[in-house]
Amino acid sequence: MTESGCIHESAVLRAAHTGQWQPELRRHTQTCAACAEVLRLHAQLTLLRAGDQPTPAPDPTRLWLKAQFAERQRRSLLIARISGFAYTALFAGIGIGLYPLIGRKLAQSGGSLPGALGWLVTDNPTLPILAALILLWYALSAQPHRAR
């Protein structure tokens, strides 16, 4: 109920209980918050007294499990987004780092792209190994994680 009462609360309660309403009292309940609250509480108590059971509260364990599941999904989505940005940045960095080397070799080989790329494999054996390791790491980390 409201903090400040109304002098008509008892009359509203009596009219709600007996069902005999005066027109001015009915109009008053439409404008007075305290009397409207008394009327609302009377209706709820009447339902409880009649044996109508209120809707049972949901199981707290189930609510907790649903919240945990939603949190795990949110974290998985966040990790997937971050790793996607990280992979993009990694491959862009590798490409940007190799661009001057390939460009220099392209100029030396007379504009032959296969010759410039062949230099990466034949003269620098660590680059193909590094590329294979990065692709392996990407393939393994892109697989869905198992439940623990």
Image (cartoon, rainbow, N blue to C red):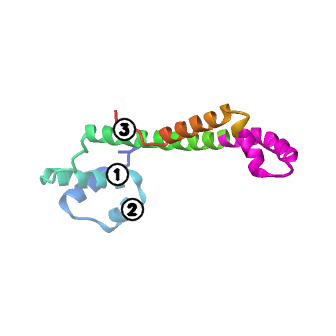
Whether residue 92 appears in magenta in the rendering, the answer is: yes
Q: Which residue is mark 3?
A: 146
Q: Which residues are magenta?
A: 91-120
Q: Residue at image x 45%, y 42%?
A: 143
Q: CA distance from mark 3 to mark 1?
A: 54 Å
SS at circle 1: helix
How crowded is the residue under tag 1: few (<14 C-alpha within 10 Å), some, or many (20+)? Answer: some
Residue type (three-letter) at the residue carrying disc 1: Glu
Q: 80 left or right of 147?
A: right
Camera-side mark, 3 or 1: 3
Q: Which residue is mark 2?
A: 30
Residue type (three-letter) at the residue carrying disc 3: Arg
Choose the circle earlier in sequence order: 3 or 1. Answer: 1
Which quadrant, please, contains the N terminus?
top left
Residue type (three-letter) at the residue carrying disc 2: Gln
Q: Which residue is mark 1?
A: 37
SS at circle 3: loop
